[in-house]
Image: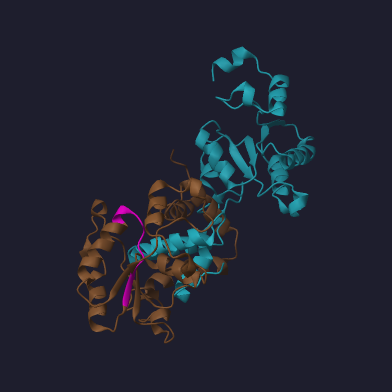
Chain colours: A brown, B cyan
């Protein structure tokens, strides 16, 4: 159903919003009408924040994280351990891991994972720059923190092959039963992995 | 949980999007990162469409519908019957009724409904301009097409009192079982109304 808009300006704005992920035309219209009810300065600030972001945003020259300058806050922070690199798919994953406050090393943002179905191969990702970082720096460990999907596993294996000849530890995030998860409702593959990769109980006590 | 953003520009844009109705910070971040992956021209057009909308939009001087000029497309259309006015709460309702293609008159957008809980009284709505339209024009019928809620009923009754001394027909949209609705699942009040306001079956045949 194509709606008839009483205004071309309104239609343009609704069309713009409905290109956002998960936003249909009805929701887009609701958003646009909500903006229309605000003060002009607020709406201008809204529009300007998008334009400025795209125009002025930079990517960290070391880890490719999003940044306001050419070095991201993590890479610029002298208190972060430069010898441990956590490899993630995207910026959102950096933010998720930062929110856990459990990691004090640095990141490497691949910009995606290997996915032949979507036409994404290793050359579309920041793989060479990762190898270069490992080659030129005093790296002790690379943590592969990719999704536990087929694409994630493929990428893990590809990175492992690229890095295995360096004298570093290559680790991957633990797979297991979620904290608070019930055994009964855990899928069999995860449960099986959690038994195979069982932990020394004593080691879990000081977490 | 307050997330730590690697960029102030990113944070500003996410904050702007999370002021939209129904959008939390996670969804806002997803939207902003989706914009960031697009071409600069597209992102600028996006931002500009919002700013232009707010700056240049007008409201129809007759019916208060949203418009690109001071007369909306419905009021400017000589093929629409000017003697029938359909009173609605907002612009979205105009669009919904237009989409049915069952109405060929003109509109009057109240800009809300009477809702003491939200501090909205008749003086906050376009009531006087409606009375003025009825007084000065050759109006035959006013259709009250407000929500069938308590606030809608209150507003209907208020408008009825304002308009009842004019020599016009005052009607309201039919309440009844939805088309395709099953009797069993229709609420009792709607079902009761649909029996009291039953239609001559013959009249329904040519719909």
Q: Is residue B64 left or right of residue A188?
A: right
B79 versus B71 height, above or below = above
Residue A1 position in % (x across, y down): 44, 38
The image shows residue A204, relative to residue A61, as above or below, that is above
Residue B108 appears left or right of A147: right
- Rendering coords of residue A19 (x, y %): 40, 53
x 60%, y 62%: residue: A38
Q: Work out whether B81 lies above or below B59.
A: above
Asked whether the viewer can see residue A115, the reply is: yes
- The quadrant where residue A52 appears: bottom left
Q: Residue at x 52, y 33 (%)?
A: B100
Q: Quadrant of the N terminus of chain B?
A: bottom right
**Closer to us: B36 or B76:** B36
The picture quadrant where one finds residue A72 is: bottom left
**Side of B50 relative to B127 (left or right):** left
Residue at the far bottom: name it: A78
Q: Closer to the camera, B58 or A81?
A: A81
What stretch of residues is rendered in magenta? A141-151
């Amino acid at each position: 159903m194509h709606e008839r808009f009483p205004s071309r300006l309104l239609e343009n704005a609704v069309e713009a919003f409905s290109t956002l992920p998960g936003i249909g035309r009805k929701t887009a219209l609701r958003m646009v009408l909500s903006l229309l009810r605000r003060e002009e300065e607020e709406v201008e600030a809204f529009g300007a924040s998008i334009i400025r972001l795209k125009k002025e945003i930079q990517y960290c020259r070391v880890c490719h994280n999003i940044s306001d300058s050419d070095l991201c806050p993590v890479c610029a922070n002298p208190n972060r351990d430069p010898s441990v690199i956590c490899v993630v798919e995207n910026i959102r994953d950096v933010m998720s891991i930062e929110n856990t406050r459990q990691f004090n090393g640095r990141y490497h943002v691949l910009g995606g994972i290997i996915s032949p179905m979507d036409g994404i191969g290793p050359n579309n990702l920041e793989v060479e720059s990762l190898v270069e970082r490992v080659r030129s720096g005093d790296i002790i460990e690379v943590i592969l923190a990719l999704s536990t999907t087929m694409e994630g596993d493929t990428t893990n294996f590809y990175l492992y092959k690229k890095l295995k000849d360096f004298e570093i530890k290559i680790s991957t995030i633990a797979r297991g039963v979620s904290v608070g998860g019930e055994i009964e409702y855990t899928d069999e593959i995860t449960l099986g992995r959690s038994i195979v990769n069982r932990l020394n109980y004593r080691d879990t006590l000081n977490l």
